[in-house]
Amino acid sequence: MLKNLLTGIIVLLGGLVKSKARRDIDRLMSRLQQESCDDEVQEALFARMVESPDQMEKAVAPQATAYQPMDEMLSATVTAFTPEERGQRRVQRKSIREQKRQARKDRKNARREARKQKRAERQEAREEQLEKSNTGKRHTWQNAIKSQTVQPLQIFYPESLEAIIDIVEEATELGVKVRAVGSGHSASDVAVTSDFLVYTHGIDEPLSLDQSVLTEAARSLHLFETEAGITVRELNGELEDAGLALPNAGGSDVQTLMGAIATATHGSGLGLGSYPDLVRSLILVSTDGEVYRIEPSNGITDATKYKDPDITLVQDDDWFYSTLVSMGSMGIVYSVILELVPTYWLHESRERSTWSQVKPLLEEGSIIRENEHFEVYINPYITDGDHTCILTKRNKVRVESKPSGAAGRRNFLSGLLLSFKLTPKVIAQMFRLIPHKTPQFIDRAMRSLEDEDYVDKSYKVLNQGLKQVKTIGTAIEIGFSMDQYIPAAEKIMEIAEQRALIGCQYLTSPFALRFVKASPAYLSMMHGRDTCMIEIPTLTQSLGREDILTHFQESLYAFGGRPHWGLETDQLTGSNDLIRKMYPAYDRFMAVYRKLNHKGTFNNTFTDRVGFSAIDYFG
């Protein structure tokens, strides 16, 4: 690579001198190829070229002997290294590489030890809870925002594939239901069960990818295999050491990877897919403890080389695109193989505008296509004659050595407020006492988001710090086709103004537009179409919160909206064939669901409500 760079520099300089000096250029390039093929010599020559601008200036002077200084520099460089010195430099470079490898290994081991310590602490806490409890093995589980509560028969904490198989086999034999939970950051009831609840935080280790069974095409990809219970935050640390990164991510990193995949969690960028679209292979434990490695028909595994007797390889589009986004309804996923990208940095900017200015830009579309990550926050209420907007743009930049701009202090005021436990109550009370000031409060909060310059590693820029927000607020999020999202957004503004006028009922936050690439996953909100996801958040303690969110959700179905599986969907049911109408591949999904969950082992109130489960009370 360095040799090509040197050659390129010489060719570039050659274009700056008169043609009669070309013979000197040819001679210099010939000597470079013949005498300086050694890496150490090339490296030293490049250093001399950079450190000797006066000689470089002479080299491009328009004289016939222009290249004599360069020629002399090459000769001096070649003769400056004896074989012994070159050997010493090789040893030094090898030592540096070994030190870097060891440092990466130490960091990885430290993270694994930290995870083991966390598991031990959780186990100790569980034992203490059981000692104090008079309900034996039963105790209460709640999701992160305490909107879902359940007291299961038993809670399990597996740390291996074999342990998961044992749990599922036992559940099948006893005729009880089993569901997997991660960090509990889904607001919906997708994980709720009153029978066997399986915590997946114990299956959180990266795995060694078996290259020998991959197809030739797959070996050229940036693949990474990991157990599915790893959190996105832990995954980012592992990927950084491997020189890899997620091409896109949601605004929070606290959820488990499989939780994000199973609910089609996404970031923003019309050329980028959501979490499930990163998956190339997954291992699923299904009914009776049967284990499958599931891939699309053109999967990364060479079926002729795959010999695992305990895990059945299934390369089938219907199986793969059904199980990707199945909300835990077809089994427990043990591990996944992801296709990733090399490490990169992002530049973020946030600028204030108005809806009357933004709408024409969205209709024209180039602002969405030309930015790798793009989103819009909108005040649902009019202030100063228009709806205030914040445009967020994130694009790749060259690798930086350190963060710049707003790194470490983004939304400082919001973060400070969230650090006080009473703040949500105080804010909610403020909205209650002077509700007519809500539009102005939202407007002032949006102005604090303005930020012209923020550069950092991709996963730090993409993480919007929404862990704290999720503990004090909740939201619905609905996906629309690209020809329907603007009418849907304006419907939200219309409803917001109407509800405020009629009953003094207000949203307590701006709503957001995010753009996501079409997905092949059958029950992804983005299935089959480029999508604008519109998120409508509000404080959990807001008056009339559930009523207004329900009204928004039901009103927006008319625009072809598909609700996010991981946010509030308690009003979404399978009645009137609603979900089948939303998803063209619904029947194909259900065919796979009936195969992998043919005994109803993975059913729960969620599958009953949305119509996946067939309930026969008299059968």
Image (cartoon, grey):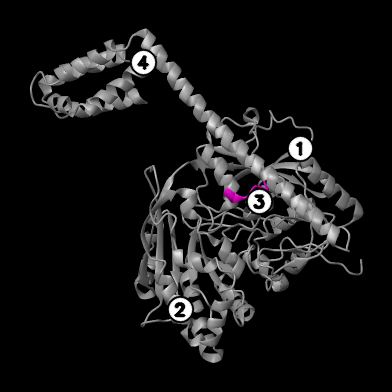
Look at the picture and state if 243 lies above or below 267.
above
Q: Is residue 228 left or right of residue 528?
A: right
- State the image coordinates of residue 255 (x, y, percent, origin top left): 62, 55
Tag nearer the camera, 2 or 1: 2
Q: Which residue is mark 1?
A: 311
Q: Is residue 316 left or right of residue 222?
A: right
Q: Which residue is mark 2?
A: 441
Q: Which residue is mark 3?
A: 258
At label 4, the amino acid type is Asp
Q: Which residue is mark 4?
A: 38
Tag nearer the camera, 3 or 4: 4
Q: Residue at x 35, y 70 (%)?
A: 353
Residue 229 included in the magenta stretch of the image: yes
Q: Residue at x 55, y 46 (%)?
A: 236
Marked residue nearer the N-terminal end (4 or 1): 4
Number of other residues with Cα within 10 Å of mark 4, as a class: few under 14, some 14 to 19, many 20 or more: some
